[in-house]
Amino acid sequence: MFNDNDFIKICEVPGPTKEAIRALLLYKSDISDDDIVVDVGCGTGGLTVEFAQRAKKVYSIDKNPEAVKVTERNLKKLLKDDYNVELMEDDAVNALKKIDNMDIAVIGGSGRELETILDIVNEKLNPKGRILITSILVDTKVEAVNKLKDLNYNPQFMEINVSKGRILDRGILMKAENPIGIITASKH
Ligand code: SAH
């Protein structure tokens, strides 16, 4: 696992997804080196880098050209050209249609297209595939759970509140990060 500070950040692109969330997503994804992963809304590549280190192949999608560029910079910086990642600068719906199949879909950005994205992911997800959605908007969390139920999944929902300690001379100052919802589901 990398530290949050290892990633190159730029102000135009949100991310990286924080360390505790990356760790939890890796764990919940049950990733192995046979898995094909899709990172929808790759942002700075925080998740792409962690998954690429462990997967057979990662497709990283973002509609923001700056996000695709910074994801590539983070891959080169942290994985030293030793990675199998296809970067796709496109809207998630268009990009997903071009991918044949996947074992793990991580959705960290969807705009207003989450339902359509989940319809396509559901079609392309291999048997025993896993879906992981991170969300900061209450509305997206509810939409994700409802859509997964409609598609006959049995979704799980966690809200993660992390505080990290800043070690100062006179003590430890706790700093809260934004709460993040994690919705997970798997195909049986
Ligand atoms: N997990 C990332 C952060 C994701 S931020 C990291 O670790 O850095 C969410 C990203 O989703 C943004 O970069 C945004 O451009 C992208 N996004 C939102 N809706 C999208 C869509 N419909 N298609 C493609 N990318 C999308």
Image: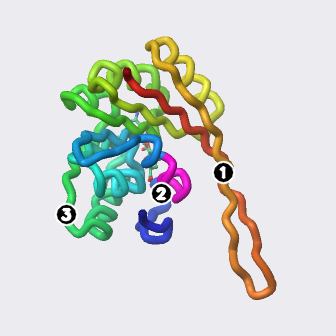
Give the residue pinned by disc 3.
82
Q: Along the horizontal axis of the image, is 43 left or right of 103?
A: right
Q: Is mark 2 within 8 Å of ligand 1?
A: yes
Question: How many residues crowd mark 1 within 10 Å: few (<14), some (14–19), many (20+)?
Answer: few
Q: Residue at x 34, y 36 (%)?
A: 104
Residue receiving disc 2: 16
Where does label 1 land, which residue? 178
Q: CA distance from mark 3 to mark 2?
A: 20 Å
Residue 20 lies within the magenta run:
yes
Residue 38 percent across, percent down from the top left: 31, 39
Of residues 172 and 43, the one nearer the viewer is 172
Q: Position of residue 11 (x, y in %)?
A: 49, 61
Q: Please, is residue 49 above or below residue 166 in the view?
A: above
Q: Are marks 3 and 2 in contact (CB under 8 Å)?
A: no
Q: Disc 3 on helix, strand or loop?
A: loop
Q: Residues within 10 Å of mark 2 (few under 14, many from 20)?
A: many
Q: Residue at x 19, y 63 (%)?
A: 82
The alpha-carbon separation of the residues under discs 1 and 3 comes to 32 Å
Dot placed on the residue nearer the N-terminal end, 1 or 3:
3
In the image, residue 170 above or below residue 26:
below
Instruction: Decide: is 77 above or below 181.
Output: below
Give the magenta part as a residue range: 14-24
Query: Nearer the observer, disc 1 or disc 3?
Result: 3
Amino acid carrying label 2: it is Pro
Q: Amino acid at mark 1?
A: Asn
The alpha-carbon separation of the residues under discs 2 and 1 comes to 13 Å
Quadrant observed for ligand 1 in the rendered image: top left
The quadrant the N terminus occupies is bottom left
